[in-house]
Image (tube, grey):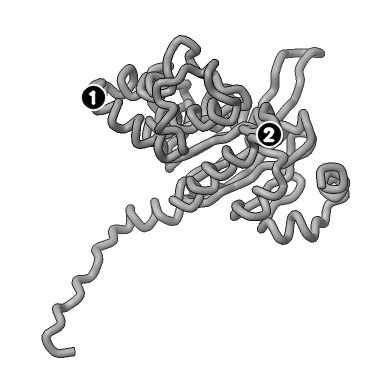
Amino acid sequence: MSGSSPVEPVETTPAALRQAQEPMVQARDVHKVFGRGHDAVHVLKGVDLDVARGSVTVVLGPSGSGKSTLLRCVNELEEITAGSIHVDGDLMGYRRDDKGVLHRLHPKVIAKQRSRIGMVFQRFHLFPHKTALENVMEAPVQVRGLTKGEARRRALELLDRVGLAERAEFYPAQLSGGQQQRVAIARALAMDPELMLFDEPTSALDPELVGEVLAVMQDLARSGMTMIVVTHEIGFAREVADHVVFMDDGTIVEEGRPADVLDNPSEPRLQDFLAHVL
């Protein structure tokens, strides 16, 4: 077409291509054992999991199946017993020397790795003596070194994003459970995480408050945030998830697209689970 400016090719390096193609989370043969000897409890038994960038992975399973422990291992809140977990290409919790031997990282280095991952728990863990705004400001000021002015502007933006701009000066005791959980989500987002982990974020809420939290999570998913969500909300898994994982007794029993896993499960353990929760 005459008069049109030529389109310049986008330069893509091999390293950038590799990064775009490799999963955001890659877990390989992950084991977690609590205790020793006769009292040892083998909670994770060789878990392999890939989580694609920009995707939503929902993890389902009965109580005690290892779902929450897997999340805590991804975030280095629990040290794995064997295997490896990479997040954005980085080996979590360890460095490998020239001979391939693994060495545990210094706690400060692990804390820096963890700062790239946001986590939202069943309970909100908000500071009761700080307002919603102050709760969201705290980590960017203390950990990332933002000025209070910068942190305040960002916190107000995030509270608005989760629908709580008018509650910025309220204390946790003045907020409903759903509002407190939305503050907790804003607080996690304040660190600009590359990955968000949700550990049954609606299980402690009254039924009428669940929807407002799930709506915020749906908005996050639409924005392209990589998310791993442990939940019993089958509707959320069906509507929002790109990938559904079913765990039982410390292993991944079945995984795949929501339509396949939820509507046409092949494993009897998953069929039985769905029969009880649907």
Of residue 240 and residue 48, the one placed in the foreground of this image is 240
The N terminus - image quarter = bottom left
> As drawn, is 170 to the left or to the right of 144?
right
Measured in 3D between alpha carbons, the distance from the residue under mark 2 to the one under mark 1, in whole angstroms, is 38 Å
Q: Quadrant of residue 60?
A: top right
Residue type at numbered disc 2:
Lys
Dot 2 lies on which element?
helix
Q: Which mark is residue 259?
A: none
Work out which residue is located at the far top of the displayed protein and give it: 129
Residue wearing tag 1: 149
State whether residue 2 is above or below residue 124: below
Specify which label sits upstream in the sequence, 2 or 1. Answer: 2
Q: Nearer the viewer, mark 2 or mark 1?
A: 1
* Residue most extreme to the left: 3
The answer to whether one can see residue 173 in this image is yes
**Mark 2 = which residue?**
67
